[in-house]
Image: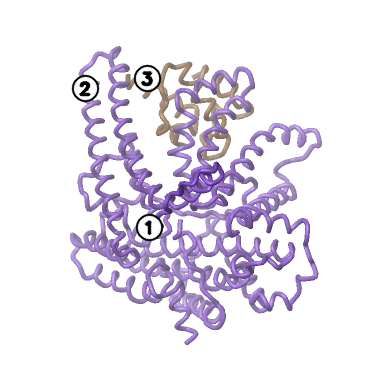
Chain colours: A brown, B purple
Amino acid sequence: MERLIEILEDIQPGVDYENSQDLIDGHKLSSLSIISLIAELEEEYDITIPAVEIIPDNFNSAQRIMKMIERLQEEY
Amino acid sequence: MQLSTLLLGGGGKSLTSLFSLVYLFVFLPGCIIVYTALPKKCKKYFLLLASYAFFWLISSSLIIYLILTTFSAHYFGIWLDRIGTQMRSHLAELPKEERKAAKAVCVSKQRRVLALAVILHIGLLLVLKYSPFFTTNINTLLSKLGVSVQLEVPAAIMPIGISFFTLQAVSYVIDVCRGVVKAEDDLFKLALFISFFPAIIEGPICRYGQTADQLWDCDKIQYKNLTFGIQRILWGMLKKVVVADRLNNFVTTIFDTDKDYSYGGAIIAIAAVLYTVQLYMDFSGSMDAVIGTAEIFGITMPENFRMPFFSRTISEFWQRWHISLGAWFKDYIFYPVTTSKKMKKLTSSARKKLGSHYGPLIAGAVALFCVWFCNGLWHGSAWSFIFFGMYHFVLILTGNILEPLVQAVNKKLHINSGWFVYRLLQIIRTGVLVIIGELFFRARGLKAGMMLFGRIFTDQRFEEVNEKVFDKLRLDTYDLIIVGITLLIVFTVSILNERGVCIRESLAKRHIALRWAVLYGLILFIIVFGAYGGTYAPVDPMYAQF
């Protein structure tokens, strides 16, 4: 989780990623940040994030992003 | 005589307007009565039959394209689902380290089938909607190159609503491929999702997961749904008949009938503003009628507008205007392009060199270009529509490029972007940019659009903005007062809705006398202040042609 928070802060600083639960719904992560985030996550965690996974439910908090990563890792 | 013209709004001869007499007083009540009389198990089949009857009445033999689209989406859905099921059972048998390679093989097969489905569906749309445009342009190119051969320009054969039901069918097939929804075995259920009669002319573009089950789980009509649905239709009628139709003479004269463009820039600028208001009132009013009709049958349709003129940026505007189309482009074009292998590689390397903002902007710009090219073309087969798309692409891209600079300037000048005045200026700027876009959208071709836009700056003729000219353009002071009051009512209700106040829910809790008084008041307002009869000409449903 620490590494994920680091990636998020590197992409878009100034957001409380530990506690925020509305990263997408609250417009805290822009669509450009999401494009960066996906590229970084795929590299870091050796996963493939298809377009279908880009929904608020998967990106609204760091915890949810982590959950998605774990699920995608499990799929292989 | 005049009242009958109101009831025949939208031409009245056909069902293409959900505000026409034949729809409101014959088709819809007929559907409600038969639907209520039928046993539960037959209701869904009746809705399907009613939807096909509706489409046949507005498109006659062109219904074949709806049937073909439905059969094709059904077949491809099942095919893709089978590949997915086989893949999952095959992967489950393999050791973990072999799954990735095996999955890639299956996904590749699925993608080939999906590509075939998309090519067939979008190809049919392209052939029917754009072949005259493409042929005309090829002929122009050939003559410019000095080639004497000219292709025969095919006649436009376009079933009403094809752009809407094609996108719905394509979204269903993609969603099945992605595993978002399961393929539908029941052809009739899928057919009802694609053809549901209120939404087939102008949308909203629904996803299978949003409405298919609701449509198929037909239940008896509830009193609350019936009254809420009627109220919503009347609300839409208020927007359409009182405002959109009242502005029609002025707008049509400036953009269509005044062939020599004899008016000055000031009147053209006013016409651009009024056309934008008219388009919003017509389209959002039609959406009220669609959502209201669906509500009567207990179906919740997605909203297509959320106070677009309160947007601070063009990007935000398109998240609030024609929401279902924007969401379609985002889910099926923007993200697939930006998350393609090449783009992801590009984003990773560009981010290291250009930083977190400009790095992903390259992939974002490519995807944005694809989205806005398709958006422009979707609206019509003419260069002015492609220009309309490119105009918004440039505006959104420029906004993204300048964002760090604006933030830096704001910081330096101690400007708080949350300040009311700052926000207001952003809203006004966005509104002006939208109106300029709509001017090109409405003009008779790109050349005419350029000419009209240029005249706003070169030949204003402010002296033309007087009562006499407005009277000549059939928009007198009385019309302006009615439009102003109605817009104020619509604006107030929109603000309350935005703040989570549901006026219909609050009204439902009041005494029955008050409820009916409000309903009758609304009907009376439409009858008294609606623009019908005399010299008024109702607007044809604007988005039906797309």
Label 2 marks a residue whose chain is B
Label 3, secondary structure: give it. helix
Residue mark closest to the camera, 3 vs 2: 2
Distance from Cα at disc 3 to Cα at disc 2: 18 Å
Task: Tell me: residue B18, above or below residue B358.
Answer: below
Label 1 marks a residue whose chain is B
User: Do circles 1 and 2 both sit on a common chain?
Assistant: yes
Residue mark closest to the camera, 1 vs 2: 1
Label 3 marks a residue whose chain is A
Residue mark closest to the camera, 1 vs 3: 1
Q: What amino acid type should be assigned to the residue bearing mark 1?
A: Ile
Report crowding for label 1: few under 14, some 14 to 19, many 20 or more residues within 10 A (C-alpha). few
Distance from Cα at disc 1 to Cα at disc 2: 46 Å
Please report the residue visible at 25 percent of the width from the left and 67 percent of the height from the top: B35
Which residue position is annotated with label 3?
A73
Q: Position of residue B16 (x, y in %)?
A: 40, 67
Q: Position of residue B508 (x, y in %)?
A: 44, 68
Q: Position of residue B185 (x, y in %)?
A: 20, 44
Horizontal side, residue B461 vs residue B156: left or right: right
Horizontal side, residue B192 vs residue B421: left or right: left
